[in-house]
Every structure is written in C-alpha cells, then in structure tokens.
Image (cartoon, grey):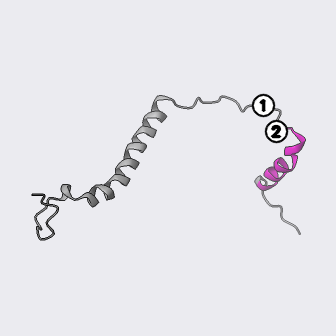
Amino acid sequence: MNPLANPKNKSVPWWRVGMVWLVLSGPLSVMVASFFTVRLALLHPDPVLKEPARSSEASSPALTPAVKARNHAATPPTATP
C-alpha cells in the first residue's frame, strides 16, 4: 500500500512529499550555478591591464557625440555670476 495514496495518513515524512522537492529545486539550482560561476571566476580571472587600450574606435567620427557627452558629464559645473 502506498502511504501517499491514502489522504487520511498524516504521518508522511517531508521528503516523501513531491511539492517539497519542487519548491527546493529552484534555490538549489541557483546555489549550484553560483558555485560553478565562482569556480570559473577563480580559475580564469581577467588579466589586469597596465595602461588603457588605445583603439581607433575612440577617435571615430561616429562616436564623437558620445565622447563629448561623456566628457561633459564628467566635468564639474561652473558657477555663473
């Protein structure tokens, strides 16, 4: 006789209930994925650049408005009399 088939049986252990495993599977899969991500980050770190990369993209005419806006946002406001 299956103890889960009888609805009057209230002494079913928690690990025999399917809903428990459905609820726990989400957080457990996230934990496994985070450990995998930490392992990847520790085994393959990004190299540290000693000087900024000089690319021709920064001097591209298509990016001139973006560079001008970035530089404008980085400068402190001037006081007007």
Please state the horizontal and vertical placement of residue 4, each as a whole percent of the image.
16, 61
Please state the horizontal and vertical placement of residue 2, each as a whole percent of the image.
13, 58
Circle 2 SS class: loop
Circle 1 SS class: loop
The amino acid at mark 2 is: Ala
Please state the horizontal and vertical placement of residue 52, each as a whole percent of the image.
72, 33
The C terminus: image quadrant: bottom right
Left/right of residue 48 with respect to residue 41 in the rendered view: right
Name the residue carrying label 2. Answer: 58
The N terminus: image quadrant: bottom left
On screen, 26 above or below 63?
Answer: below
The amino acid at mark 1 is: Arg
**Residue sitting at 12 percent across and 60 percent down?**
3
Q: Residue furthest front?
A: 1
Q: CA distance from mark 2 to mark 1?
A: 8 Å
Q: Is residue 59 magenta?
A: yes
Left/right of residue 34 with respect to residue 6 in the rendered view: right
In the rendered structure, find residue 28 and report the number of the disc placed on it: none
Mark 2: give few (<14), some (14-19) or many (20+) Cα within 10 Å.
few
Q: How many marks?
A: 2
**Residue sitting at 81 percent across and 50 percent down?**
71
**Residue sitting at 64 percent across and 30 percent down?**
49
**Residue sitting at 18 percent across and 59 percent down?**
14
Name the residue carrying label 1. Answer: 54
Magenta part of the chain: 58-73
Please state the horizontal and vertical placement of residue 19, each as a whole percent of the image.
28, 60
Q: Is residue 22 magenta?
A: no
Tags 2 and 1 touching, CB below 8 Å: yes
On screen, 40 above or below 64?
Answer: above
Choose between 30 and 9: the one closer to the eye. Answer: 9
